[in-house]
Image (spheres, rainbow, N blue to C red):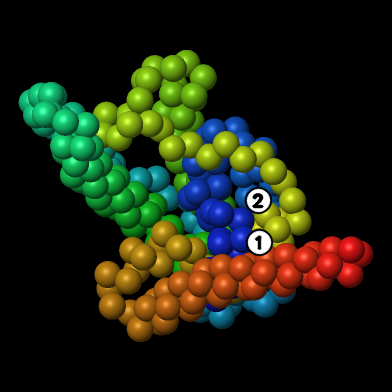
Amino acid sequence: GLLVGVGSAMGNGCTSGHGICGSARLSPRSFAYTATFMASGMLTATATGSAAALNIAPLPAALVMPKVAEAQLAAVIAAAGIATFAALAAVQRLMGAADSKQQKLQQFRGLELASELLAGCIFALGLGLSGMSRPSKVAGFLTLGAPSWDPSLPFVMAGAVAVAMVAYQGVMRFRMMAKPLFCPTFQIPTSSVIDLKLLAGGVIFGAGWGLAGICPGPALVGALTGDPHVLGYIAAMVGGMFLQGRLEALVARVGSGGGRSTKSMST
């Protein structure tokens, strides 16, 4: 958890932020981070035997088609999500024009929070339905050469990227929406910098991911179970994010102090 926290803070993202959203934006920065944490995760999981450590049976992963009930559940979740988003949009229109810009922003903030909560719930249900909330499912893919090697993870990610790409490219390239329904502007990362900090963050994040088979999103979903191992992981992850921020601030202060000292000596 500590490694995942530090790495995600250094790289400003994780498997969903860079691996799905960034890839859907066709961001070179996200491609670099994703490739780095994937390689690091595989090397770490393979070297440490994560699949065996998580007691995965040494049997080949079977190809199992979705059951009718599972397909129906997925369809219901998708339909309910779309219908609820449409209802929120209708509420926004029914509110009409606010008396002031401040009141309008307050109205939008409530709808924005509701839409974010809904999106998070749908994402959590997707993780659970696909099995990606289970560390054993992730470790089964990252541990190369294991008898139980399971290629499910890249198919899940590819499906998520395909859906997200339609939305992102529709907004970014084809201008299907000038602005979001519930906030003033789209908040899309624009940085294209691929530097040592990004790549090092990917290596550290991947190492933690490979060891535990869990990243921030599934960890938050798993917290609902009250499992002390997951709660400990989240505490370490948050601590890692905080630690990385403090260390970066300390390095910046030391660097600026050194620069002032050098300037004083030269004058």
x and y percentages locating residue 87 in the rendered image:
13, 32
Q: Residue at x 34, y 68 (%)?
A: 222
Q: Residues within 10 Å of mark 1 (few under 14, many from 20)?
A: many
Residue lying at the far front of the rendered structure: 267
Quarter location, residue 206 = bottom right
Quarter location, residue 76 = top left
Residue 13 shows in the view: yes
x and y percentages locating residue 140 in the rendered image:
55, 64
Q: Is residue 10 left or right of residue 14?
A: right
Location of residue 152 with respect to 178 vertically, above or below? below
Q: Residue at x 65, y 61 (%)?
A: 201
Residue under pointer 1: 201
Q: Is residue 246 left or right of residue 200?
A: left
Residue 81 shows in the view: no
Between 68 and 37, the residue placed more toward the observer is: 37
Residue under pointer 2: 33
Q: Is residue 69 left or right of residue 133?
A: left
Q: Are marks 1 and 2 in contact (CB under 8 Å)?
A: yes
Asked which secondary structure carries label 1, the reply is: helix
Q: Residue at x 49, y 63 (%)?
A: 215
Location of residue 109 with respect to 13 vertically, above or below? above
